[in-house]
Image: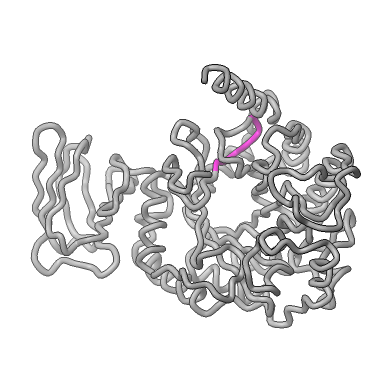
Amino acid sequence: MKKVYAVILFICLLQVCFGQAGYRPDPENQRNREWFEAARFGVFIHWGVYSLLGDGEWVMEQQNLGLAEYGLLPGFFNPVGFNAKEWAKLFKSAGARYITFTSRHHDGFSMWNSRASDYNIVKATPFRRDVVKELVDACRAEGLKVMFYYSLLDWKRDDYLPSGRTGKGIAGRDEKKGNWDAYIQFMKSQLTELLTDYGRIDGIWFDGHWDKPSADWRYDEIYSLIHKLQPHCLIGNNHHLAPFAGEDFQMFERDLPGHNTTGFGTAAEHVGELPKEVCGTIAGSWGFDIKDRQRKSFKEILSYLVKAAGYGSNLLLNVGPMPSGKIPDYQQERLVQLGEWLKIYGETVYGTEAGPVMPTDEYAMTKKGNTIFLHLFRPDNGSFIIRDFPYELSSVVSFDGKTSVPYQLLDKKVLVVQLPEGLTDAHDLVLRLSIK
């Protein structure tokens, strides 16, 4: 067992060394980190040719489609309903501060006019429009910042081979043709395009490290390239490990920081000090799934946003547009509902820091200056006991300040809040706690 632990530790140390050695974020990057930490809410967009099959973004792997079979999809991809301006207005109305768009997913298909690969939306589809350019322009017009998801793994290219943990059943690839140097150069060429052809980009969101966790990903080269092209650009990597050198934020997939309820997420001991982002879905899957039966309620999504903020983290909430380019109605509805809530309660989320007590299923706290916002998800309970509360308080009132709320601060830092009759909310009752 000791030998196994030593090997794991050695691999983790190697991964850290792969990062941008000696990285020190410059002032532009620090300012962008501050913006990111204050933003608290962004929209994730999973969209590509996989949407045609209506079975999520992993359909190529999960349905064991060969290269020739999957290669037919671009010829059918003509999303005439796509309207970047409508998307951007929806995201703005939802209260989002930024978007993260899947520029290239694991299937290797690029959603911009890439010079490094003809396997892209302009050259390989009848649509022949640069979705990335249209979306970037539309979001900038609405005051939204833009980040790009970029897949490290590729189920199409031979130079990525040999296969990692995924893609082994994809017919048409020659496992003997791998050329890692060429693949790294290909990724650097595409990242250079994304960071030179589309103006200011505020972040790169990598995914797929886990497919080949022991590979030499040459993050020192890749991260240095990104920070050289756009020093402010924030780098995150969904590797589910402690942050590597050169990274600027840490993300948590379908989980609050350190929870790892999925079993493949980030363990508590790997939660670092970088700005944090939780990503989750409105539907059951990330990409469009025509048979989705896991639609989340508004209360579920709202509590996810508030709990993430209670951990000092952003929420990156995903939508999966249909093949037509339209975002499903129920996903639009959830975004609109969030926007209406944030118009009233936005100050309890935007620009806040983590609360003094970690969130539970009953409550979450966020802090701004000498005010703590207490979000109660089950106000019908009437009273709440919050342990390890570290502050003396001068008052507890309703969010609008019109109703005084009785409370006691007992020995051993136990806060007891007793809600007056009639003070309730169907989704999230917010109280203001003033620190002495």
- Residue 264's spot in the image, x, y percent? 53, 44
Q: Nearer the viewer, residue 360 or 394?
A: 360
Quadrant into which the C terminus falls: top left
Left or right of 416, for residue 14:
right
Q: Is residue 248 magenta?
A: yes
- Residue 307's spot in the image, x, y percent? 37, 52
Q: Is residue 414 magenta?
A: no
Q: What residue do we see at 79% from left, 72% from top?
A: 73
Q: Which residues are magenta?
A: 245-250
By secondary structure, the bulk of the magenta-drawn segment is best described as: loop
Left or right of 87, for residue 268:
left
Q: What residue do we see at 23% from left, 53% from top?
A: 432
Q: Is residue 375 visible?
A: yes
Left or right of 416, for residue 133:
right
Q: What residue do we see at 78% from left, 48% from top?
A: 191
Q: State which quadrant residue 81 falls in.
A: bottom right
